[in-house]
Amino acid sequence: MTLHTTAQLAASSTKGVNGVALAVFVFFFLAVTVMGFLAARWRKAEQSANLDEWGLGGRSFGTWVTWFLLGGDLYTAYTFVAVPAAIYAAGASGFFAVPYTILVYPLIFTFLPRLWSVSHKHGYVTTSDFVRGRFGSKGLSLAVALTGILATMPYIALQLVGIQAVLDVMGIGGGEHTNWFVKDLPLLIAFAVLAAYTYSSGLRAPALIAFVKDGLIYLVIAVAIIYIPIKLGGFGHIFDAAGKALAQPGAVPGKPRGELTSGPHAQWAYATLALGSALALFMYPHSITATLSSRSRNVIRRNTTILPLYSLMLGLLALLGFMAIKAGTDIQGNPQLAIPQLFEDMFPSWFSGVAFAAIGIGALVPAAIMSIAAANLFTRNVYKDFLKPDATPEQEHKVAKLVSLLVKVGALVFVLTMDKTVAINFQLLGGIWILQTMPSLVGGLFTRWFHRWALLTGWAVGMLYGTLAAYGVASPTQKHFGGSSAEIPGIGEIGYIGLTAFVLNVVVTVVLTFALRAAKAPEGVDETSPADYTADAGDAGVAVDLPPATAGAPAGH
Amino acid sequence: MPEPSESPTSRQVVTPTRVVAGLCLIAPFVAMLWVSSYARIEPTLIGIPFFYWYQMLWVLISTVLTMTAYKLVQREQRARKGGAAK
């Protein structure tokens, strides 16, 4: 440990600030800040002081805005930094992100239009709203809401870690010797700006900024994937060098650092990670928020046919990890720096600035959406359900804005006070946790057969098993939370803990449902009806429930 | 899986179109979760091992499949709505 701090010290003192890159970065940052504040006026409805407007952008977004919003949301700065970093560190196993994002879309295609319909029919803002309405259980709804908030917080923290990586490489992250305030000042500024425009503009701000972010990202990837391989002598050379480097002994004694393709013992882990992550991704409150803000069912379905463009980009981006190996990028002991450092080494300064801006802004968009989603959950399912049942729409709106601030401050404190690995551990746990809300949500979308108490017990069992199993995973650098895969009981293969916990959760839910039904336990009131799940914009009852949604939107139907 | 017994206007739940659409949506799962089918280096494409380019190719294949499913569902919906209006 001491060794690498000295290395860092040496590196930061010799490197200095990259002026041109910094100037370009600041320019883009200022531009999106202005956009963020102006966004409040974009597609504005007449009546704006309610949660539908602030938290779901008036539910008026069409195909393209939703595409940018969902893309900006699901492919975060952390993804851009972490996926190539995983490839750099261990090779093939990091590539699971590609099948994972391939599998997300058929799932969204199947599940989310039903959620959209029932939410529009009944004015649901969050998944917990739906669970409460479907199962008549505030307890289950609270469990889903708290899981969502808990899982989202570390995710926001990781976005800040992504920004930090970029700031470090630009040389303004400061070394170990600088005062903590000076060191963290750039992050604090970025953060204050983000908080201010989310507060004032709501979901419209990230939606608008997402255009810039994705434009920049696509540009950077397109250039990187052509320019860097040419500089390094082609993909053949890159993979030769990577294959040799990965075959060297790694951190675990007696085992190589990684492999170029998924070996026989890693395939279960690869597949279960891809499947489990795909299932978890659209359970996250921020993906749901982006989905519900769309104008119609078809916007969602049409989106699942164009969103895979991002997966392709992610795949190309992942290959940058191999390029960093070939280029011999100096990562100062932190694989997270592999990509920013590769950009700095390979590109001219001004274009590094563009690339860093892409990553930095790439962190702001999801952080804003995530904090809004967490705020929606708290306001609707904790504040309104438990603390102040008679809250007016204006009060809901105010509380949500405040909570979005609190959530972000919480994430900031997290990043500044704790080690980065803590944030990563929690994000890993978050994925396992959020997956446990799936039986209630997706189960509820298709059937009312499950019993609410069974769902609650299944959730608790899944949470407990997942947390304990993750705690027990050791890695060469960590005693606990060393990874997200462990042996699957009964099968003996290594698999994703989240998926194992999920299967356990479903088994418990099914068995208990049989028992509770036999015992005739009270089932709770279901306020939805089967037709609600297929209703579309323009159908009777859908538009009427939501005057703000139609006020500003062009008549698409 | 909507419960047909509960809906008074019970319509055919399993139509050939829906089966095809369903298959289009399931195919990526079979292909991607069957890791041993693509965990190899050869044949390489412009120097990229099979493992990587094959999965990226599936991004495109799954896009086409989802689009097909979308068109099918869309067409069926339109037909149903048209039928209901008349």
Image (cartoon, rainbow, N blue to C red):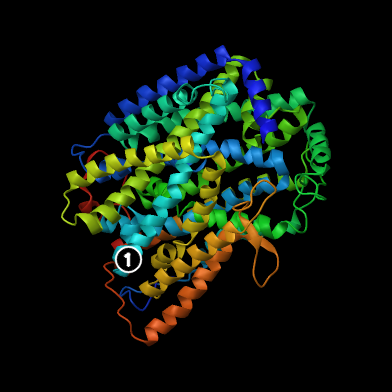
Residue A519 in percent (x, y) is at 36, 87
Q: Residue furthest top?
A: A19
Residue A181 is left or right of residue A40, and the answer is: right
| Residue at 42% from the left image edge and 27% from the top image edge | A188
Amino acid type at circle 1 is Gly
Residue A179 in percent (x, y) is at 49, 22
Q: Nearer the viewer, residue A332 or A137?
A: A332
Residue A124 is left or right of residue B59, and the answer is: left
Q: Is residue A419 above or below residue A425?
A: above
Q: Which residue is mark 1?
A: A139
Label 1 environment density (alpha carbons within 10 Å; few <14, some 14–19, many ≥20) = some
Residue B9 in percent (x, y) is at 32, 73
Residue A321 is left or right of residue A380, and the answer is: right
Residue A439 is left or right of residue B34, and the answer is: left
Q: Quick check: can you spot residue A530?
A: yes
Q: Quick check: can you spot residue A541?
A: no
